[in-house]
Image (cartoon, grey):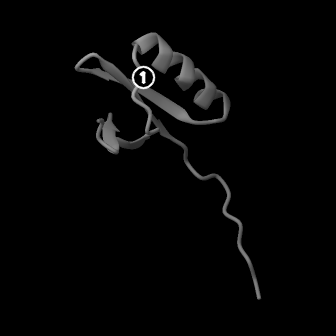
Amino acid sequence: MADRARLFEGRKFLWDGVDYESEEEAKSAGEAYAGEGFEVEVWSEKGSAFVYTRRVVKEAAIEQS
């Protein structure tokens, strides 16, 4: 099992929750996340690969009452 969060170059990324069998499979999943606007890092450890993602909020919805 991977760490839920990991720092890459001082920036916090969150694990997508999937334990991929190969780095190629993880990179493929990462490309899908990147297509949705996420920053992606792939981490390999002990025969498994993990995808970590982050996305900076550009706009926040504000509700007024």
Is 19 or 64 nearer to us in this picture? 19
- Point out residue 24 in the picture as x, y percentages from the top left corner: 47, 11
Asked if 15 appears above or below 57 in the picture, the reply is above
Secondary structure beneath disc 1? Answer: loop
Which of the 4 quarters of the picture holds residue 60?
bottom right
Residue 38 lies left or right of residue 44; in this view the side is right
Residue reaching furthest bottom?
Answer: 65
Asked if 42 appears above or below 52 in the picture, the reply is above
Is 21 or 32 nearer to us in this picture? 21
- Say what amino acid the circle numbered 1 marks: Tyr
Quarter of the rendering occupied by the N terminus? top left
Image point (39%, 28%), residue name: 19
Image point (32%, 34%), residue name: 9
- Point out residue 18 in the picture as x, y percentages from the top left corner: 44, 33
Quarter of the rendering occupied by the C terminus? bottom right
Which of the 4 quarters of the picture holds residue 17?
top left
- Point out residue 34 in the picture as x, y percentages from the top left corner: 60, 28
Per the image, the residue denoted by label 1 is 20
Residue 8 lies left or right of residue 41; in this view the side is left
